[in-house]
Image (cartoon, rainbow, N blue to C red):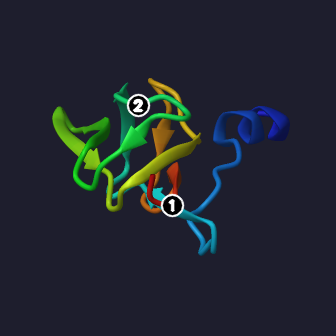
Amino acid sequence: MPANMMIAEVGFKEKVRGSSRATAVGAPIPGAVTIIAVERGSPVKKGDKLLVMEAMKMQTTVSAPVAGKVLRLAVQPGQTVEPKDLLVEIGGPE
């Protein structure tokens, strides 16, 4: 396989790192994003469903760890992620 094909398939994935203005929500498991339940700008409460991931036919719901507003969606349905890959950023309380 040519090296450039391998790079295109692997791609770049942003890992979660600290931010003073937002809470980064990382992937808890490796798997595929199947459902995104929020949109950019959506207000969320702690515990609200953000998205659903699937790995080995088991579904995992990723919930908001804090209340605030969705600042960024870093994934799309069908995208494969690894643990700690950035999924969503949530801004301060409403």
Q: Which residue is mark 2?
A: 38
Q: Position of residue 93 (x, y in %)?
A: 44, 59
Left or right side of 8 for 50: left
Q: Above or below — where is 21 with respect to 1?
A: below
Q: CA distance from mark 2 to mark 1?
A: 16 Å
In the rendered structure, which amino acid carries the disc numbered 2?
Answer: Val
Nearer the observer, 65 or 62: 65
In the rendered structure, which amino acid carries the disc numbered 1?
Answer: Gly
Q: Position of residue 62 (x, y in %)?
A: 29, 47
Q: Which residue is mark 1?
A: 92
Q: Position of residue 30 (x, y in %)?
A: 37, 50
Nearer the observer, 6 or 85: 85
Q: Above or below — where is 84 with respect to 59?
A: below
| Secondary structure of the residue carrying numbered label 2 | loop
For the residues labelled 2 and 1, say whether their Cβ atoms are less than 8 Å apart.
no
Left or right side of 25 for 29: left
What number of labels is visible?
2
| Secondary structure of the residue carrying numbered label 1 | loop
